[in-house]
Structure formats: structure tokens, C-alpha cells
Image (cartoon, rainbow, N blue to C red):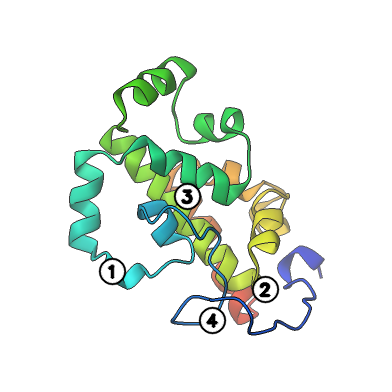
Amino acid sequence: MSDTLTKPALKKKTNTAVGHPKNGRRPARKAGGGVASLCVGGPTGKVTASKLIHMIQAGLPVQELRDLQINLAVPMEKLVPLLGISKATLHRRMAGGRLAPAESDRVVRFARLMDKAVAVMESVEGARRWLNSPQFGLDGAVPLDYAGTEVGAREVEDLLGRIEYGVYS
């Protein structure tokens, strides 16, 4: 049995930090308050699916990309190719202040994966480590790399669900 399919051993948590109101876990980032921050350990109940769709269609602010990069703790040079954004396009988006709808959708996709990984691994650091390490359940692929497509992202979500419920097949 591969140890990548099991939750890492965790230290007992104290109640000193303010956590997610639903399940008590810590948010990945306290500042921000945007969609990426809301999808990663924030009060997701405040953004309805309908509102999120409209926000994505309008294009998220570039700050959402920065928040995602901070939450995942990966260099921007690694993150933007995963999101299908070239260097030239990134500079245009930074200057314009908004992401395109397709880019916004991918930012939300990765933010939701981070949130699911935090829930399953029970810590932000554990989630980051898991998302950046090859996983047996993905045939040795790194989850962040695998999630570059919607199908790959669904496979990563499925693997996290199997880990959460202890289903190894």
C-alpha cells in the first residue's frame, strides 16, 4: 500500500486560531477576501454558484491569481503555464487588471482543489505538499500538473475523495 494514499500524521490542533465556521479548519489565507480566498478555506456560503458564474464570466481581478499563487505557495512562473497563460498574456492581464473568463474559471478550479486538499489533509501545508508531490493514484503524476485540464482536475478531486473516505481502489 502506498503511503501517498493515506493522510499524514498530524499534531493535535489547538483552538487558538479562528477557523472555517463550518469545520473548524484554518483558512489558507486570512487576507484577500476574493473568490480564490473564499474557495480556499473561506466562508464559501457567501458566494452562490450563480454569483460565482457571473464573476467568472466578467473576468476575475488579477488579484485572484495572486491570491491563488500565495495559497498554493508555488512560483508564478510555475502556476501560469498550468492555467494556460503565457508570459505575454500575464503581463497584459496585470496591466489590464482582469483575467479572461477562461482563465478565471481555471483559477477557481485550482482554488477549489486546494480547498478540497486542505479539507482532506487537514492542514494547508499538508495540502500544498500533497498537491506538489507525485501520487500513486494518478499513475505517479503531480496533482497540480494533472489538474491542467478539467478531466484531470476531476481525477484529482476523485482521488482526494477516495483518500478522505479510505477507498484505495
Q: Amino acid at mark 4?
A: Gly
Please name which of the two marks, 3 or 4, marks the residue nearer to the observer: 4
Q: Amino acid at mark 1?
A: Lys
Q: Position of residue 119 (x, y in %)?
A: 56, 72
Q: Amino acid at mark 3?
A: Phe
Question: In the rendered structure, which disc, 3 or 2, sits on the residue that comes first in sequence?
Answer: 3
Q: Secondary structure at mark 1?
A: helix
Which residue was labeled with disc 2? 168
* Image vertical order of residue 104 relative to residue 81, above or below: below
Please name which of the two marks, 1 or 2, marks the residue nearer to the observer: 1
Query: Circle 4: is it few (<14), some (14-19), or many (20+) Cα within 10 Å?
Result: few
Which residue was labeled with disc 3? 110
Question: In the rendered structure, which disc, 3 or 1, sits on the residue that comes first in sequence?
Answer: 1
Which residue was labeled with disc 1? 46
Question: In the rendered structure, which disc, 1 or 2, sits on the residue that comes first in sequence?
Answer: 1
Q: Secondary structure at mark 2?
A: loop
Q: Position of residue 65 (x, y in %)?
A: 44, 40
Q: Are marks 3 and 1 in contact (CB under 8 Å)?
A: no
Question: In the rendered structure, which disc, 4 or 1, sits on the residue that comes first in sequence?
Answer: 4
Q: CA distance from mark 3 to mark 2?
A: 23 Å
Query: Circle 1: is it few (<14), some (14-19), or many (20+) Cα within 10 Å?
Result: few
Which residue was labeled with disc 4? 24
- Residue occupying the point 81% across, 70% down: 1
Q: Position of residue 14 (x, y in %)?
A: 69, 83
- Image quadrant containing the C terminus: bottom right
Q: Is residue 2 visible?
A: no
Q: CA distance from mark 4 to mark 1?
A: 17 Å
The image quadrant of residue 21 is bottom left
Horizontally, residue 11 falls left or right of residue 31, namely: right
